[in-house]
Amino acid sequence: PCPRPFHRPNSARLSLPHAPLPAGIMAQFATREEDIAKLLAAECHLGTRNADYQMLDYIWRRRLDGIHILNVAKTWEKLMLAARIIVAIENPADVIAISARPYSQRAVLKYAQYTGAQSIAGRFTPGTFTNQITKQFREPRLLIVTDPLLDHQPVREASYVNVPVIAFCDSDSPLANVDVAIPANNKGKHSIGLLYWLLAREVLRLRGAVPRSEDWSVAVDLFFYRELKDIEDAPAYEEDAPATGYAGYEEEGAADAAAFDPAAPAADGEDWNGAAAATDGWTAQDSWDNTAAAPVDAAAPAGGDDLAPQW
């Protein structure tokens, strides 16, 4: 009979000695309650009713209504891992963030603006990574994809040219040709904006551009998708807002406006019209005004009919 293969129990596995990391480094990458609260407020943990078999490791449980709940702790771990991979690229322009979903195009553009990466928002032209004849041919070293199901074309082309892919994956997202999967809700506008904001902040912190002890000055609202109605209504709120002037002049102008009353009667012995007429006499004393006035010839015809030529 065939001998039984050698099997080592889990308790007997060899453990290689390793030096523990300093406590300060571990504290820097530790999760904060504020960031976890933001992930929960933006509904980054909500999946879909369907689940891919490769995403089962990232699903915590399933609600009674059929919605799968993603593990937020693994979302944070994969965000930190993705940020370290991005920082390892020497040239930030070699990283391309792609999104064909309208809700995530603004987040992709903002991420590229603050991290120095390139962005492709909207339709992806087939052959951008494989066809050198195209005008938009690019050779990236790293690809960041918002939805591997919707952005399947760039993910497939990246596998042809051996470009690693970082993707935000929902519970029903396929993980084919995806190297680093970040489990998160990639269909909500607030969830997508917050994920790109956290990723950009961590990248800048690892590069040393933003100190870890301070909060990032960029608001997360800039990464959120804005409806066309909200953009059209924005000038109306600005017009209704009170205008602010320089310090000191605003207070003096308000005091003068409060003291002036056009409907109030004039004081005894004060004639405003007469004072205004007296101030208009300065033009008669000016030398150029006297020379500018030309004498009018009394013999000149007054009507316009006499000026016509006689045929």
Image: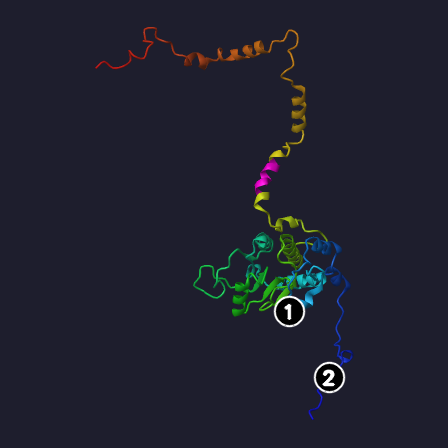
Where's the N terminus, which quadrant?
bottom right
Of 34 and 246, the residue lying toward us: 34
What is the secondary structure assignment of the residue under circle 1?
helix
Instruction: Name the quadrant containing residue 143.
Output: bottom right
Give the x, y percent position of residue 102.
56, 53
Q: Which residue is mark 2?
A: 7
Which amino acid is tagged 1? Gln
Q: Residue at x 63, y 9 (%)?
A: 270
State the image quarter where residue 183 is shown.
Answer: bottom right
Task: Judge whether residue 43 can be spotted in this image.
Answer: yes
Query: Is residue 36 found left or right of 235 in the rendered image?
Result: right
* Mark 1 in CB contact with mark 2 (< 8 angstroms): no
Which residue is painted at 65% across and 22% down in the image? 257
Is 225 drawn above or below residue 136 in the view shown?
Answer: above
The image shows residue 216, relative to residue 278, as above or below, that is: below
Frontmost of labels 1 and 2 is 1
Q: Provide residue 175's location: percent of width, then percent of height.
A: 61, 67
| Amino acid found under the numbered disc labelled 2 | His
Q: Residue at x 32, y 6 (%)?
A: 299
Name the residue furthest bottom.
Answer: 1
Observer-nearest residue: 128 or 176?
176
Residue where numbered disc 1 is placed:
54
Q: Is residue 185 above or below residue 233?
A: below
SS at circle 2: loop
Q: Which mark is residue 261?
A: none
Q: Quadrant of the C terminus?
A: top left
Q: Position of residue 204 (x, y in %)?
A: 64, 56
Within 10 Å of disc 2 (Cα), the crowding (few <14, some 14-19, many 20+) is few
Q: Any magenta on residue 236?
A: yes
- Give yes or no for residue 93 being in the magenta stretch: no
Q: Which residues are magenta?
A: 231-238
